[in-house]
Image: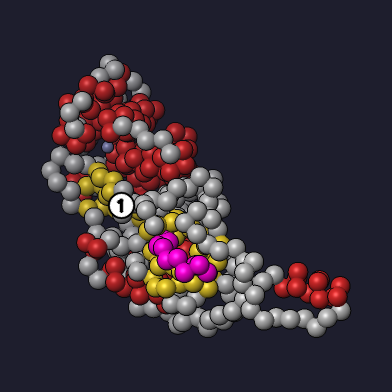
Amino acid sequence: MMRFALLLGRPLATLLIVASLRSPAASLASAQQSAAPVELAPVLFDAPIATLTDSGWATVVQATAPEILRARNGLGDEFEVSHIGIIGPSAGQGEWRPRATDQHRQLLPAGTRVWLEAQEGLANPRDRLALRHVFREDDRSEPVGAALLRAGSVWVFPHAMHAFVSLYADRQAEAVISQAGAWGETNSSAIFRPRGASFGGFPIAPRVQPALEALDKPDVGNELLKRANAFPVEVGVARLPPGAVGAFAPRFYSIQLSLAIMDAPPESIAAVLIHEMTHANQMIEQGVSGEDLGCYDLEIQAFEASAVYWFGIYGRGGKARPTHWLDRELNETLQEYNNHQITRRVRQAYGHECGAA
Ligand SMILES: [Zn+2]
């Protein structure tokens, strides 16, 4: 599921690297009280120092990946920082990764002072790597992740619910619409925003729009889409292995529908889409709650979502006059659901993926 590319870089913003961040208000107040001249020499000892556990100031040593940088704190301790809520191209994605890393370096050059904001309950993904919102000292209005999203060098990723979810979804949507950076090299060129959503929207290949509209029509589909829209997942079309009608790639945070089903009616494609969208939503839920459903349960839930959607449109018997082979498959899934056989089917069909149980 190739997904990304990058940007050749936008003009470097002028950087103001201020040596000290002692609270100016406090200095001024105490200066006025004592009527002594204001002393603005660098005083760093009382500024919070970023650590692997706490928010604070640090200096960028170097951006090492599209969403990861090395930082050094005032004690000389160096560690890695990954931006909360975004991820960039993997090593298997060719030129996209080095280009995205360059983009990161342009926005956060070595020596930049940054505020690293920890989020309550969000654990470090691995030893010596902290998940943080990264703010530049000269721009505390929004995290650098927003600019990376707007540049099209990274995409949203559901590490956890956070304060910049709608901002990030909007920046990503802007990048898709303007085909910024990597988006210009993908088939995702439009945005689908579910009914009632006031921000964001899913990056889509235009040909999947009718299926999204069909999914968005009933409340069951609309509710799922609105939940997933907090972290808008890409929805595209790809040539998938025989037998696969859709796929969800967690690392790329991308749903791909099989080219082989694109001639089916939009409602039938939507029934496949709801299965994959359920997997995206499971990933979001896991980020929010930390709860990890087992492999079989994830599949059972996805098949059930598909059956419930199909039931909602065509009733208990399914589509009376199937017009596509996919309709017959969906009728069969609904039949299994009616007969409480989804679990058995999943255990048979996913033994390989889920391991012996
Ligand atoms: Zn599945």
Ligand 1 occupies quarter: top left
Which residue is at the front of the view, 117 or 30?
30
For the record, the magenta segment spans: 73-82
Residue 257 pos. (x, y %): 26, 47
Taking the spot 55% from the left edge, 64% from the top edge, the residue there is 49
Dot 1: what SS? loop
* Residue 42 sits above or below residue 214 on the image: below
Where, by quadrant of the figure, is residue 286 drawn? top left
Which residue is labeled 1 in the image? Answer: 251
Query: Is residue 241 rendered to the left or right of residue 64?
Result: left
Query: Is residue 16 rendered to the left or right of residue 5?
Result: right
The quarter of the picture where the N terminus appears is: bottom left
Q: Amino acid at mark 1?
A: Arg
Q: Is residue 288 visible?
A: yes
Residue 35 pos. (x, y %): 86, 79
Taking the spot 51% from the left edge, 45% from the top edge, the residue there is 121
Taking the spot 18% from the left edge, 32% from the top edge, the residue there is 355
Query: Is residue 54 rendered to the left or right of residue 38?
Result: left
Taking the spot 29% from the left edge, 39% from the top edge, the residue there is 272
Q: Residues within 10 Å of mark 1 (few under 14, many from 20)?
A: few
Q: Is residue 199 visible?
A: no
Q: Check residue 81 for magenta coloring.
A: yes
Q: Check residue 260 for magenta coloring.
A: no
Residue 62 pos. (x, y %): 39, 73
